[in-house]
Image (spheres, rainbow, N blue to C red):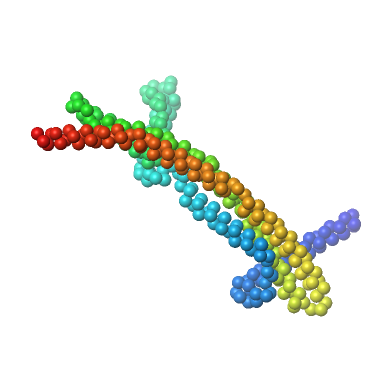
Amino acid sequence: MDGWKALQSNLANLNLGQSASKIAKGFNSSVQATRERLGQVSAEDITELPQEYKDLETRVDALRATHFAILKIAKVYENEGYDYPTQIQESITQLSTTIGHGITNFAATSLKGTNIPAPSPVAAAPVQHKTLPHALGRAATTAATTLQGAAGNAGDDKLARAMGVYASAWEKIAAARVEQDAAIRTKFLQPWQTTLSTSIAVAMKARQAVNSSRLELDAAKQTFRNASPSKQEQARLEVENAEDDLVQKTEVAITLMKTVLENPEPLSNLNELVKAQLAYSAASAEALSVIQGDIEELAVAAEGEYRKTRDH
């Protein structure tokens, strides 16, 4: 029992010694960082990191900044209403419709078997996409119906026909727009964000470890310079250990940064973004080019009829 207590005591003392050593190193590193920030340390007293490491740092910083810059803008594709602010009001109207539908169906189910007349269940209104192409298609369809209904037996309403043709084009464009956004979200935004939060983040942590190790080394060197003769040997060993640690951490960081920079994934992701945007632009151009000739014919015919009425 006495032996077990002695072992526990020794372990406690060992852990306490390790903790105290860590705290001391952390404190010395913090002091070193503060002195450097305040310009109280000369350049020759700051350990120089390998040029290869510094060059890789610059390139990784540029890669990271690129990911942030593009992601900041491209994240709009996560919200389909990015090109149609008016959709906010439409959303409120749709919300009211959805709530009304829910209440009606709840009543239809809950009031069965009671003396209170229950309303008949109603089908939910289809969800409307809140994009500009969808909005233009809906508006043109409504306009075509309204114009043709107002014309009645008065004859052919060319603007109504044109609106119908216009609506058909935007129906195709709207479908292409939904496909584009879905492709961008899954094939660009998600992997682009993953690269930023995994491999680049790991490389950044490795660099932080190098910086901490470098501060520990320079703090140890400072301690060695100021050590009394009785403590110089221990201080020298601390410097050697810190040098070994810095070399190891620098090598790891260099390897990780090279891995990040050699990763072809960002280029593949960018290619997927361009492909999705190109497919949408091509579909839009094709749909509009198909109807433009028809609408132009209607416009020319309407102009001719207008001039005839003026000539008479």
Q: Residue at x 63, y 57 (%)?
A: 204
Pick whichever, 30 or 145, lies toward us: 145
Q: Position of residue 227 (x, y in %)?
A: 77, 77
Pick whichever, 243 or 118, lies toward us: 243
Q: Position of residue 287 (x, y in %)?
A: 38, 35
Is 198 on the left-hand or right-hand side of 109?
Answer: right
State the quadrant of the N terminus: bottom right
State the quadrant of the C terminus: top left
Is 116 on the left-hand or right-hand side of 53?
Answer: left
Q: Residue furthest left?
A: 312
Is 146 on the left-hand or right-hand side of 217?
Answer: left
The answer to whether any part of residue 80 appears in the image is yes
Question: Where, by quadrant of the figure, is residue 95 drawn?
Answer: top left
Q: Is residue 51 above or below residue 296?
A: below
Pick whichever, 53 or 303, lies toward us: 303
Q: Position of residue 175 (x, y in %)?
A: 42, 35
Question: Where, by quadrant of the figure, is residue 298 drawn?
Answer: top left
Question: Where, by quadrant of the figure, is residue 234 drawn?
Answer: bottom right
Pick whichever, 229 or 71, lies toward us: 71
The answer to whether any part of residue 103 appears in the image is no
